[in-house]
Amino acid sequence: MDFLRTPAERFENLPDYPFTPHFQMVPAGDGDELRMHYLDEGPADGQVVLLMHGQPSWSYLYRKMIPLFVDGGYRVIAPDLIGFGKSDKPTQREDYTYANHVAWIKSLLDALDLSGITLFCQDWGGLIGLRVAAENSERFSRIVVANTGLPDSNGVADEAVADICKAMDAYYQTIPVHANALEMAMGMGGDESSMKFMHWQKFCAESEGFRPEEVMVLMLSLSEEEKSAYAAPFPDESYLAGARQFPTLVPIRPDNPATEANRAAWSVFEQWSKPLLTAFSDSDPITAGGEIRFQQSVPGAQGKPHVTIAGAGHFLQEQAAEELADVTIKLIQDNPL
């Protein structure tokens, strides 16, 4: 598997990111290995909090939350997904599959032999982290779900699959590659949510103007230094394959190869009695309402003090770090091992 490794100097002097890098080799899936970066902060014997980022961010997104967990005596593991941050970046989009991302994170957890994990996940960190938790439940003790989901085409009748996919294929061909694709993807609730998301898929896959830091700036108020930190992993277009591919991997189509695996994960969560808390923001139209299925379907979510983070958008870790850390720590304290 061909890959690139972002030069270390790209990550020098990042604001509020003084953390020591750690690396673990994980199987690439074709006999080769890839180097995954992760942060490992706090006491080695502390209860583990696993922080999972999504697209197009990296562990820098958690820089405000990490010290709060460490001050509480917890051990924080914050990986960079393959293709992001300081982790290796395969150059071909087809090397990035949902199954590969799940396998890469599982390999990291196996190598570190983590247990009693409290998972905090957002965006693709949830799509991946929740799958890993469902398939390796013995390692996980608690979950906080924030602005994410586990899509599985729930409710689509088998006899409708062919017609739905045909309509989606036809619609995708009509979508222009335009700069306001993110706005088109907003307000994704309702019957047209998949169609709206396809604008974002096409923009990320095909737009010459796609840059991760510009996506972050569209959704957050960042300083120039912070914007540069989100740009750091991607010196040029050749490093962007993973970031471009992620939206295409979201199983919004019932024939997506990940759909069955996600349905299997939901079967696990429908029997999941361990504590699960939702912490969605009130200003994220992308995942609005996504907390409801978790609250209603997961036994371990019943009676939990689910929270709505006021005034925060999709990347709520930037805007509500203290509140998110507090609710996670309270979940741990209220539900001891």
Image (cartoon, rainbow, N blue to C red):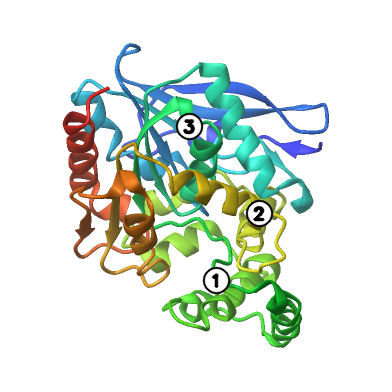
The residue closer to the viewer here, 225 or 121, is: 121
- Residue 11: % across, % down: 49, 35
User: For this view, does 304 lie left or right of residue 48?
Assistant: left
> For numbered disc 3, what is the local secondary structure?
helix
> What amino acid does circle 1 point to?
Gly
- Residue 51: % across, % down: 40, 37
Q: Quadrant of the C terminus?
A: top left
User: For this view, does 101 lie left or right of residue 42?
Assistant: right
- Residue 158: % across, % down: 69, 71
**Cα–Cα span, label 3 and label 1:** 26 Å
The quarter holding residue 217 reads bottom left
Front position among marks 3 and 1: 1
Q: Answer whether residue 223 is visible to the viewer in this image.
A: no
> What amino acid does circle 3 point to?
Ser
Residue of label 2 = 260
> For numbered disc 1, what is the local secondary structure?
loop
Q: Quadrant of the N terminus?
A: top right
- Residue 55: % across, % down: 52, 54
The quarter holding residue 3 reads top right
Q: Identify the residue shown where x is 30% and y is 33%.
A: 66
Residue of label 1 = 155
What label does residue 137 carry, if any?
Answer: 3
